[in-house]
Image: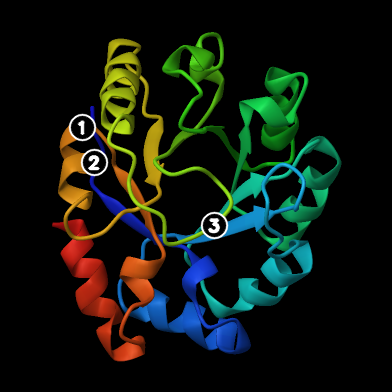
Amino acid sequence: MQNPVRIAPSILSADFARLGEEVRAIDLAGADWIHVDVMDGHFVPNITIGPGVVKALRPHTTKPIDVHLMIAPVDAFLDDFAAAGADTISVHVEASPHTHRTIQHIRGLGKRAGVVLTPQTPAKALDYLLEEIDLVLVMSVNPGFGGQSFIESQLRKIEAIRKMIDKAGLSVDLEVDGGIDRNTAPRAIAAGADVLVAGTATFRGGPSAYADNIAALRG
């Protein structure tokens, strides 16, 4: 059964010179989760932040910190992000030679485990993993940069994964990240998403606009 919609603003679009203040502002504005995109310049063509920034942000919010690791190989970094204060750690199926073992490691650290599918990764990649995880993240843009346009074909993938989750009777969160705005958010929700990651659409207009931006995405 589809859970209530939650909004997870991506701090990738925040003002990095005021990151603690930005996290407090989106928390007060109604964000459900805080989404942190970690890029390594290897798995994706960009570099963002490491566990030190997550640790620095942890005191600024009581909301769950949702960490999306665009790192390969990923396993060596799991302990550091868990210790830094991540609540959910999500990894790409292509980022570890043994995704099942990686999921076990994350859960062994006491964290929620997620699996990420890039636009070309089929829903079938979740076979034999779905019952082991807490979250599926469907990338509706190619990972690596904010501000991209929503890839329409991912709606079919979201629908397929929603059917898989419901058929198995699981409570796995179905998160969508990429090109989410006032127009694409309701379509992603209709397809079966229950967590929306939004960077540009959340942080546009500055702190005074954050509450309205988040409310508009929630529908």
Q: Earlier in the sequence, mark 1 or mark 3?
A: 3
Q: Earlier in the sequence, mark 2 or mark 3?
A: 3
Q: CA distance from mark 2 to mark 1?
A: 5 Å
The residue depicted at 30 percent of the width and 29 percent of the height is 153
Residue in the foreground of this view, choosing between 159 and 110 = 159
Q: Residues within 10 Å of mark 1 (few under 14, many from 20)?
A: some
> Would residue 214 appear left or right of 112 to someone viewing this image?
left
Residue at which label 2 appears = 188
Q: Residues within 10 Å of mark 3 (few under 14, many from 20)?
A: some
Q: Secondary structure at mark 2?
A: helix
Q: Secondary structure at mark 1?
A: helix
Residue 61 image position (x, y, % from top left) = 52, 74
The residue depicted at 68 percent of the width and 51 percent of the height is 45
Residue at which label 3 appears = 145
Quarter placement of the C terminus: bottom left
Residue at which label 1 appears = 191
Residue in the foreground of this view, choosing between 143 and 167 = 143
Contact, mark 2 vs mark 1 (Cβ under 8 Å): yes
Residue 50 image position (x, y, % from top left) = 75, 62
Q: CA distance from mark 1 to mark 3?
A: 24 Å
Q: Secondary structure at mark 3?
A: loop
> Would residue 134 appear left or right of 103 to someone viewing this image?
left
Residue 198 image position (x, y, % from top left) = 37, 60
Give above or below for 129 relative to 59.
above
Amino acid type indicated by mark 2: Ala
